[in-house]
Every structure is written in C-alpha cells, then in structure tokens.
Image: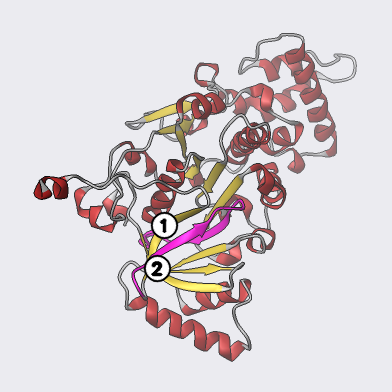
C-alpha cells in the first residue's frame, strides 16, 4: 500500500493570481516570484542567443495558467507557434516539482500585408486583416504617411477620410478600390483630373499591399474571450516592408486599441501584452499612433489589469516614460557591463559613477558563473537577483535558446 501511494503523482500546481514563480534564485535555488497584485510593467532586454524567447515563453505560459489572457503582439521570428505542443523532455527538469508540461492554445496570425513579402503562408499561420472601420484618422495618417505630404494633399487626405467615414456610416461596403472611388467623386469643378491622378498615385499602394482583405478580417476579441486563444502576430521580415507606408504601426495601433478597449470594458480577462522588438516602433525619434497608445496605456491602465512586457535589445531604445514605469527589468548574462550599469541606474540602485561601474562588473562576473542566468531588478522592492528562468510549459524552439 505504501509503495502504491508513493507512485501517485503529486497534484498539479495551482497558479496564484497574486504572485507567480518564473525562475529559481541562483544563490539558494528558491523560487523567484513576480508580484501580481498590481498590473506589471516589465522590460526584458535580449539579443539573439540570450535565451529571450525561452524566458518570454516561460512567463507567458504561466501567466496564461492564472486565467489572464496573453497576446504576443510582435512575434518577429514566428517562434511562438511551437507552443501548440508541450515542452520537450530535456527541459522538464527545469520545471517546478509539481508542474506538468502542457501546450498553450497559441494561434499565429500573419497580417495580410506580408503577402507583398511572401505570398506563401507558413505552417500553423493564418492570415489576419483588420476591420477597416477601426481605422482612426490618426491611423489613416500613419498608414499613408500624410505628415510627409504637401499641405494641399494633407487637406485632401482629411476630406477623403471624412468621406470614408460617411460612406461606412451609410452602410457602404469597403473594397480595396474604395479610396479610388472617393477620389473620383471629388468635385470636378474644384479639382482637376491631373490633381486627382496625383492623389490616386498616393493611394494606389493600398490596393496592391494587401493591407485590407475582407476574407481574412477576424474578430480578435472573440478568439480570446470565447476560445481562450493566445494570439501571436507573426511580424517576421517586417523590416523588409516599404518604409513609404505605415502598415506595421497602423496594424499594431488597431490591434492594441481593440485589446485595450475590450479590457477596459471587461470583455476579456486581465491581459498581458508582450511586444518583442518594440524599439522598432517605440523609439524616441518615432511618432505614431501605436507608440502614443502604448505610452498612455503603460501610464493609465494598471487599474484595468493591462500588463505590458516590452522587449528590446538595449535599454536606450525604450522611451524613458516606459523605463520609469517598469517595476521589473530583466538583463541576460550575455549583456555587457555598461548595459548592466544603465539598468542599475534606471532603478536607482547605484551611487557614484565609479561605484556603479564596480557594481556592474561584479554582477557581470556573477552572471557568467551561472549557466543560462539573468539579472532581474525590482524597482519597488529595491532588490536585484541573479535567476535561472523556469522552462516553458509548452514546446520551445531549441535553436533559439
């Protein structure tokens, strides 16, 4: 009887909504917990080979088990589709004692404008197009780079956007050539055919870009609310898209607005938005609606249970307004001493310049002694720990560890 009892596996872990184990402390092997009483703002720094995806997946899988919704807003290497399977046997020793591998209900969506880069859809990817009715005038301005147009064309773009809204409000069904129709309908006495032709050229990209495709217009919120899906938006090769149009930031703006609106109305559970390569859209020298929404949400949406994980290669590429709001900063062992020093400074954990350099050098030495280690800084508690992230619950693409 005793032997039979010993063979019964322990009950599975219950994931606490107030604190969440994400790693083990290097100094004593005990669990390191994120505090979840308040909505989390986290910065994770990581270049290729740092273990960034492994760490993100481990956090995302466990957050999902607490009942929160998770969105991988920028999956720049199409990595998270592997979460559809449970973690490999070789990683199971890095789980908690009573933790069991399990797949996550990830669905990878590929924005339709990437058809201009590669029309072939990868396995386990699904085309996704936004609802054109969600396009605000600010989004419209980003999409067509209106700020770079002449004053006359700026005025005309404002009119075309207003005409579009009237068209939709009156029950019109948007097609890819609708903008051309709206231009053709401009007053013939006020605008010459030559002027209209020039305006058409500025909008011709929209027809060929695939930015809008009615066939693939999907309701993101119903996927999350009704099916418990974890969406991952595949932005692989985003840097090869034309910079003459703002397809990426406009898409991100519309998706983010949809998530924030749904959460504020409690239509979806508390949400964790994980944004990889965020500096490509949030850097200080950028001005777009997506960035505006992120900055406002990081500042104001704690009470709505909106959590942000901002991922970048270097701290200096993240707006100071976000850095100052971040409770946690995670730094991989491969980071240089100056990066560690900057992170310590950002959370107020250094004194003089020489003291900060010496402290950063000591931490770097400690990190290099522990395999797969990270430094995590907690602004609120004023603490720092060297940790080893727990393995994901779902399959990890080993080539990216």
Residue 293 x, y percent position in the rendering: 69, 44
> Does dot 1 land on a helix, a strand or a loop?
strand
Quarter residue 96 falls in: bottom left
Q: Earlier in the sequence, mark 1 or mark 2?
A: 1
Residue 44 coordinates in the image, percent (x, y): 50, 60
Residue farthest front in this picture: 1
User: Residue 229 lies in what quarter of the image?
Assistant: top left
Q: Which mark is residue 14?
A: none
**Residue 380 visible in the shown view:** yes
Q: Is residue 38 rendered magenta in the image? A: yes
Q: Residue at x 61, y 23 (%)?
A: 131
Image height check: is 186 above or below 158? above
Q: Nearer the viewer, residue 336 or 393?
A: 393
Query: In which quadrant of the rendered image does the N terminus lie?
Result: top left
Magenta residues, as a range? 28-52
Task: Provide residue 384's location: percent of width, then percent of height.
Answer: 50, 73
Camera-side residue: 237 or 126? 126
316 sits left or right of 142 in the view? left
Is the Cβ of the residue at disc 1 closer than 8 Å to that at disc 2?
yes
Q: Which residue is mark 2?
A: 387
How far apart are the two marked residues, 1 and 2, measured between alpha carbons? 9 Å
Q: Is residue 365 above or below residue 138?
A: below
Q: Is residue 90 above or below residue 305?
A: below
**Left-right relation of 358 to 284:** left
* Label 1 neighbour load within 10 Å: few <14, some 14-19, many 20+: many
How far across and how far down the image is residue 74, in percent?
50, 44
Judging depth in this view, the residue of 223 and 232 nearest the camera is: 223
Residue at image x 71%, y 52%? 299
Q: Is residue 46 visible?
A: no
Q: Which mark is residue 22?
A: 1
Looking at the rendered structure, the secondary structure element under dot 2 is strand
Q: Is residue 169 left or right of residue 123?
A: right
């Amino acid at each position: 009887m005793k032997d039979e009892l010993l063979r019964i596996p322990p009950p599975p872990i219950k994931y606490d909504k107030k604190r969440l184990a994400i790693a083990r402390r290097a100094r004593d092997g005990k669990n390191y917990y994120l505090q979840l009483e308040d909505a989390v703002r986290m910065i994770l720094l990581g270049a290729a080979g740092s273990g960034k995806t492994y760490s993100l997946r481990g956090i995302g899988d466990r957050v999902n088990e607490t009942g929160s919704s998770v969105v991988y807003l920028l999956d720049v290497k199409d990595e998270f589709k592997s979460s559809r399977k449970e973690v490999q046997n070789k990683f199971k020793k890095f789980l908690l004692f009573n933790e069991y591998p399990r797949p996550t209900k990830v669905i990878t969506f590929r924005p339709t404008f990437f058809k201009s880069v590669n029309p072939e859809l990868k396995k386990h990817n699904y085309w996704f197009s936004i609802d054109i009715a969600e396009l605000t005038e600010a989004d419209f301005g980003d999409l067509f780079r209106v700020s770079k147009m002449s004053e006359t064309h700026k005025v005309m773009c404002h009119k075309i956007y207003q005409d579009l809204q009237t068209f939709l409000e009156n029950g019109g069904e948007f097609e890819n050539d609708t903008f051309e129709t709206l231009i053709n309908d401009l007053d013939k006495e006020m605008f010459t055919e030559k002027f209209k032709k020039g305006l058409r050229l500025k909008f011709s990209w929209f027809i060929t870009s695939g930015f809008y495709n009615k066939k693939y217009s999907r309701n993101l919120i119903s996927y999350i609310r009704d099916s418990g899906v974890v969406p991952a938006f595949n932005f692989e090769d985003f840097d090869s898209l034309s910079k003459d149009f703002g397809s990426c930031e406009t898409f991100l703006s519309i998706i983010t607005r949809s998530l924030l609106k749904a959460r504020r109305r409690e239509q979806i559970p508390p949400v964790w938005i994980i944004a990889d390569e965020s500096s490509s859209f949030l850097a200080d020298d950028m001005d777009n609606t997506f960035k505006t929404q992120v900055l406002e949400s990081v500042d104001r949406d704690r009470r709505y249970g909106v959590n942000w994980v901002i991922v970048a290669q270097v701290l200096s590429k993240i707006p100071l307004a976000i850095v100052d709001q971040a409770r946690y900063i995670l730094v991989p062992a491969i980071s240089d001493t100056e990066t560690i020093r900057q992170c310590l400074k950002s959370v107020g954990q250094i004194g003089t310049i020489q003291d900060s350099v010496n402290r950063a050098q000591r931490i770097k030495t400690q990190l290099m002694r522990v395999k797969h280690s990270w430094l995590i800084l907690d602004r609120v508690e004023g603490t720092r720990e060297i940790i080893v992230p727990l393995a994901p619950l779902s399959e990890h693409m080993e080539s990216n560890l």
